[in-house]
Image (cartoon, rainbow, N blue to C red):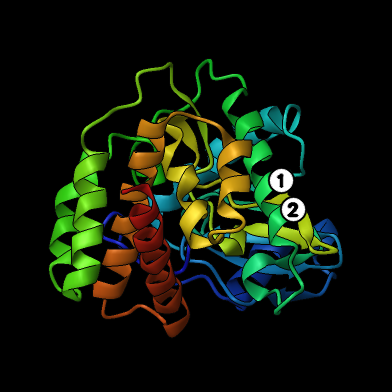
Amino acid sequence: MSASQDSSVPTAERPVPDLDLARRLVREQFPQWAELELRPVEPQGWDNRTFRLGSDLAVRIPSARGYDAQVEKEHRWLPVLAEVLPLPIPKPVAKGEPGPLFDGPWSVYAWYAGQTLNRAGAGEADLAAVAVGLGEFLTALRAAPTQDAPPPGTHNCLRGAEFTVYADEAILALAGLAPEVREVGERCVRRATESSWIEAPVWLHGDIAPGNLLLSEGRLAAVIDFGCSAVGDPACDLVAAWTMFDRETRPLFVRAAGLDQDTWHRAQGWAAWKAAITLAGVDSTPEVRSLAERTLAELAEDVAQQA
């Protein structure tokens, strides 16, 4: 999940993991790596605190008990998904167990070099290639095996559930925005509640955000952070159409990702919801507020073109 908080995020019931805790956990449970340099990764996410371990590993520690279930889920399912996906995804290397130092599970992952999309400078990302690559990745993800896979729930903040679970919150958040923005957002939200995913549940990432896409030479090279993954309605993964792409690159993503018009309408609802609650939040950073404003502007342009 991206750094901005929303109402579905479990509250931080434990102290935020820091570098000292990460060092002590590694020393206690994986002494073979105790001498490797450990340093924080910047910027940090919301669900986990991540620390680079040596040159090839990363330590990830849940920031609240509500995120602990993601650890087991990722260790169980990421190796399965990796076999069928066209791009690298996080590779679990070791799982830390609850103990005296920390009362929950935690992970050691392989470290992937690369620049996240949100850190790419002007002209450094080939957005047309990223749009096609991401659409193809999501198409492959939807085809992954789903037997015994987890449905939406508190473990993934209900990503992939019926959009109606967030519709009222979206309308409330939109009420405080400028009239022209509110009108477009409300239209997206209302339309998103008019359909449901009627096919068998499929895999979804749950947090397709710029900070979770790694680039190499301007192209999509890996997709990370599957903490919000589940099997359900894939509409929430399509928000990239408005959070990352524009009128030139959005059609490339739409074609590569496929899916029917109703699913894209639900995706617009998800995008409007997240942008609205971000702008309504008092703790939203300037960076995420800017992304939310851009998302609503792209939605407005897209809705106008469809009218």
Residue 28 seen in this snapshot: no
Q: Position of residue 46 (x, y in %)?
A: 46, 65
Q: Position of residue 52 (x, y in %)?
A: 74, 68
Quarter of the rendering containing residue 11: bottom left
Q: Is residue 113 above or below residue 293?
A: above
- SS type, badge 2: helix
**Residue drawn 43% across and 84% down?**
286
Which residue is label 1 attached to? 133
Residue 165 drawn at (x, y percent): 21, 42
**Res 285 seen here:** yes
Circle 2 Cα neighbour tier, 10 Å, few/some/many (<14 / 14–19 / ≥20): some
Q: Nearer the viewer, residue 193 or 57?
A: 193
Specify few, some or many for label 1: CA neighbours under 10 Å numbering under 14, 14-19, or 20 or more: many
**Left or right: where 233 falls relative to 88:** left
Q: Is residue 244 above or below residue 131?
A: below
Q: Report helix, strand or loop for mark 1.
A: helix
- Residue that appears at 60% across and 64% down: 211
Relative to 305, 204 lies left or right = right
Q: Who's the residue at 59% across and 71% down the image?
A: 21
Q: Nearer the viewer, residue 100 or 166?
A: 166
State the separation of the CA atoms marked 2 and 1: 6 Å
Q: Residue 200 location, x and y as percent?
A: 43, 16
Q: Which mark is residue 129?
A: 2
The amino acid at mark 2 is: Ala
State yes or no: discs 2 and 1 in contact (Cβ < 8 Å).
Answer: yes
Q: Amino acid at mark 1?
A: Gly
**Residue at x 25%, y 60% (from the top left corner):** 184
